[in-house]
Amino acid sequence: MAGQPERIVIVGGGQAGGRLAQALVAAARPFSITLICREPHPPYQRPPLSKGVLLGTASLDDCLIWPPDDRAWKAVDLRLGVSATSIDREARRVHLEDGKSVAYDRLVLATGSRVRRLSVPGSDRGNIHCLRSVDQAQEIAKHFARGKRLMIVGGGFIGLEIAASARLRHLDITVVEASDRLLARVVPNRIASMLASRHRAEGVRLHMGAMVEEFETDVRGVAKAARLSSGEMLPCDLAVVGVGVAANVELAEAAGLATEVGVRVDASLRTSDPAIFACGDVATFWHPVFDRFVRVEAFQNAEDHARVIAGVLEGGEAVCDTVPFFWSDQYDLSLQIVGLPHLGSSTVTRQDNDGAVILFHLRADGRIVGATGLGTVGAIGRDIRLAQALIAARSYPDPAVLSDPGARLKTLLDRGTPDAPAFAVTHRSPRPAAPGL
């Protein structure tokens, strides 16, 4: 109706949805904002779940996206603890599981992703957990007691972060990973080996190339041991399963929207219906820097998507061209990844005297497309951010400068961006495996 604020409905109360609602409240033009969230809690950040929340040093209030004095608390119509069940695109209404419906002028799908379950006998026992929500983190934290035997199924980011946190509480930890190394689909072997060495040094046992085939239970129905594909039996008092996530595309698919692993959108995050957007983990979006569709599961990606959609809804022509950035903190180490390393066909290594390592990933023509670093934040943070800028500039950096820890990467930015490769690519190594984008 003329003169009325535009009705924006956001489905999903994670990082992208929560930050978008906050941005729209602060926008110059008025919006009527409804946020539909399946969880019973207001939007909160997930990175602290595997760290402070597990350790009991952070609460839900510490994780909330909106500060206590933020206008969003009063301006946003929060529908908590309810799921959207269908979208009527013709009527522009979202139907909810409680029988109600919400009208929209424009709709944003920020439905995120869900954990993949381990479907083996005994995996439904009460002491077998997943970690995706604050409630799950707080439940796991209740069992973090010295000497308890914790089994982590999956050697990915979430599993390794849980292992690092649990060691601070002196738990006895075993990680079971189906691949022959940690983070097999995400980081190069050198980085994975460094992380494995650190975890072993901290007392974590790593079982590679093995799968859990069954959890054996006691007379109370509690899982007490896991039988591996190797035949080995490993005792456990509790287990956390972290074997990946899947995008929540069902709502979009049922509405007839185009999907491709996630909900397919353009660089401005519009779906095949111009009145509907998608953002965060669920969005497979066109990235102009890499000239391809990508799906990125990362905190910073959710922040960037919220900013882009807010700009578009306000009438701008924003596009998501930010180079992806991801980090994982384990012990005193920071693993940082920028760009899309799996697009590289060679790597150039930079290592400093403190043992920090950065691998720069280059295409066959010498253009930089990614970087992976491991070390303390102070040792790698600056160069990782400069690598991000080089990727954004579509640069063809000199490998000799990249590999020299005494050389300043900023000099490569100061030179500008060549139209064609200016230097031969050296220091070749095997191509890292592609992540599930």
Image: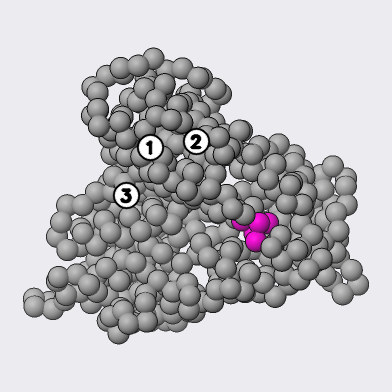
Residue numbers of the magenta segment: 161-165
Residue 183 lies, in percent from the top left, at 61, 42
Q: Which mark is residue 358?
A: 2
Give the mark nearer the N terminus: 3 vs 2: 3
Q: Is residue 122 visible?
A: no
Q: Is residue 6 above or below residue 214?
A: below
View extreme (bottom): residue: 74
Q: Quadrant of residue 178?
A: top right
Give the mark nearer the N terminus: 1 vs 3: 3
Give the residue type that dot 1 points to.
Ala
View extreme (top): residue: 424
Dots 2 and 1: beta carbons under 8 Å?
A: yes
Give the residue type that dot 2 points to.
Ile
* Nearer the observer, 109 or 68: 68
Give the mark nearer the N terminus: 2 vs 1: 2
Left or right: residue 126 versus residue 418 is right
Left or right: residue 313 versus residue 327 is left
Pointer 1 residue: 387
Dots 3 and 2: beta carbons under 8 Å?
A: no
